[in-house]
Image (cartoon, rainbow, N blue to C red):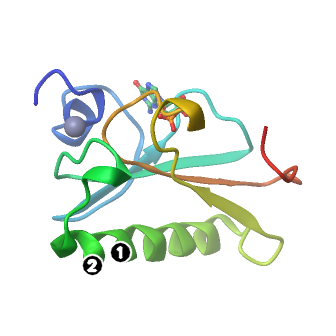
Amino acid sequence: MSECLFCRIVAGKLPTTILYEDDRLVAFEDISPRAPTHILIVPRRHVATLNDLAPEDHGLVGEMVWRAAALAKERGIAEAGYRTVFNCNREAGQTVFHIHLHLLGGRTLAWPPG
Ligand code: 5GP
Ligand code: ZN
């Protein structure tokens, strides 16, 4: 999967500001932040879209969400509020086909998203 951008980041092959990593997850700053806090949380294992999750990935997705909440607390945005987003496929605007949870915060976020 060396052609996958996020697999390359996970493997340490691209210069990236890593905020958290363990044996299953990596979290890093989005290169084009849409809010004062814009962090991407990705599994080390390549999964292209949410549609490709297997039953054994349930724990992994829970860890991703839990990590987003922990990073929001670390950033001091947990009380004010933040948003977590998985974009899945074309109509949702997914551009990198390795699942990633966006953590956005630090400003008022409009609803519904565009
Ligand atoms: P998507 O549109 O697939 O939900 O989100 C992909 C995200 O990856 C976008 O917010 C985009 O700015 C970010 N991104 C794309 N290329 C890179 C990169 O090389 N490094 C980092 N850190 N983020 C990237
Ligand atoms: Zn990948």
Q: Amino acid at mark 1?
A: Glu
Q: Quadrant of residue 11?
A: top left
Q: Position of residue 92 (x, y in %)?
A: 58, 38
Camera-nearest label, 2 or 1: 2
Under circle 2, the secondary element is helix
Q: Amino acid at mark 2?
A: Gly
Q: Quadrant of residue 4?
A: top left
- Residue topped by disc 1: 63
Check the image and name the residue furthest to the top.
3
Under circle 1, the secondary element is helix
Q: Position of residue 43 (x, y in %)?
A: 27, 55
> What's the residue at 83%, 71% (across, down)?
80
> What's the residue at 47%, 44% (across, down)?
88
Q: Position of residue 73 (x, y in %)?
A: 63, 75
65 to 48, vertically: above or below: below
Report the side of 14 relative to 1 (left or right).
right
Check the image and name the residue furthest to the left.
1
Q: Position of residue 7 (x, y in %)?
A: 20, 36
Report the side of 34 relative to 65 (left or right).
right
Badge 2: residue crowd in 10 Å (few <14, some 14–19, many ≥20):
few
> What's the residue at 79%, 54% (across, down)?
106
Q: Which mark is residue 59?
A: 2
For the residues bearing labels 2 and 1, Cβ distance under 8 angstroms: yes
